[in-house]
Image (cartoon, rainbow, N blue to C red):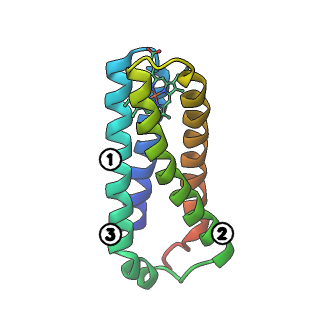
């Protein structure tokens, strides 16, 4: 698959997550938007993995291995944080005392990492030509 198509999906996921944060006081909508964003993101990672050799062939190869490692590290950290978001999110739904602050800090950290994953994706792969 073309790199730009993956990056467009990546941007949509960031925007979905932003919408989920804007709707953070509307529980049902918040949970729906975040669930779609996280599931879509995992599907996107599978797409990237499955066509990795295709990307390498199509591009001039990796521009900078350091920035690729940084990009992959951000992406992995984001997915690990998704697990924590679901876990703490369920506790939020159960109105567990003291969980809100934790869910909020984890939530903004996850969002920041997801944005950094998107930004570094542009440096990780050289354009074709
Ligand atoms: C990447 C995923 C997620 C992010 C970035 C995120 C972020 C946030 C943020 C920033 C808040 C506001 C907290 C505050 O200001 O006190 C919030 C509230 C909340 N979140 Fe999430 N969240 C995510 C996923 C989830 C999931 C998966 C669930 C449920 C399973 C969930 C359930 C809730 C609930 C119930 C609230 C409180 C809503 C209210 O004020 O009534 N969140 N979330």
Residue 64 at least partly seen: no
State the residue in front, 115 or 84: 84
Which badge, 2 or 3, comes first in the chain's sequence? 3
Q: Which dot, 1 or 3, sits closer to the camera?
A: 1
Q: Residue at x 45, y 14 (%)?
A: 25
Using a 10 Å C-alpha cutoff, classify the residue at mark 3 as few (fewer than 14 neighbours), some (14 to 19) or many (20 or more): few
Image location (x, y in percent) of residue 93: 38, 21
Using a 10 Å C-alpha cutoff, classify the residue at mark 1 as few (fewer than 14 neighbours), some (14 to 19) or many (20 or more): few
Q: Quadrant of the N terminus?
A: bottom left
Above or below: residue 30 compared with residue 25? below
State the residue in front, 10 or 113: 113
Q: Residue at x 48, y 79 (%)?
A: 59
Q: Quadrant of residue 69?
A: bottom right
Above or below: residue 55 compared with residue 83? below
Residue where numbered disc 2 is placed: 67
Q: Which dot, 1 or 2, sits closer to the camera?
A: 1
Q: Which dot, 2 or 3, sits closer to the camera?
A: 2
Which badge, 1 or 2, comes first in the chain's sequence? 1
Cα separation, mark 1 vs mark 3, equals 19 Å
Q: Residue at x 54, y 47 (%)?
A: 114
Image location (x, y in percent) of residue 5: 37, 59
State the residue in front, 60 or 73: 73
For residue 109, side relative to residue 129 (left or right):
right
Which badge, 1 or 3, comes first in the chain's sequence? 3
Cα separation, mark 1 vs mark 2, equals 25 Å
Residue where numbered disc 3 is placed: 1
Residue where numbered disc 1 is placed: 39
Asked if the beta carbon under badge 1 is closer than 8 A to the nearest atom of ligand 1, the reply is no
Asked if the beta carbon under badge 3 is closer than 8 A to the nearest atom of ligand 1, the reply is no
Cα separation, mark 2 vs mark 3, equals 21 Å
Residue 127 at least partly seen: yes
Task: Determine whether the residue tagged by mark 1 lies in a helix, strand or loop.
Answer: helix
């Amino acid at each position: 698959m073309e790199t730009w198509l993956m990056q467009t999906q990546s941007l949509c996921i960031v925007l979905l997550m932003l919408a989920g944060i804007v709707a953070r006081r509307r529980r049902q909508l918040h949970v729906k938007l975040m669930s779609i964003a996280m599931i879509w993101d995992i599907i996107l990672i599978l797409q990237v993995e499955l066509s990795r050799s295709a990307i390498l062939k199509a591009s001039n190869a990796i521009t900078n291995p350091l920035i690729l490692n940084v990009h992959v590290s951000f992406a992995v950290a984001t997915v690990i944080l998704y697990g924590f978001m679901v876990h703490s999110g369920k506790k939020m739904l159960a109105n567990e005392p003291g969980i809100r602050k934790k869910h909020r800090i984890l939530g903004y950290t996850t969002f920041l990492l997801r944005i950094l994953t998107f930004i570094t994706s542009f440096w990780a792969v050289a354009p074709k030509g």
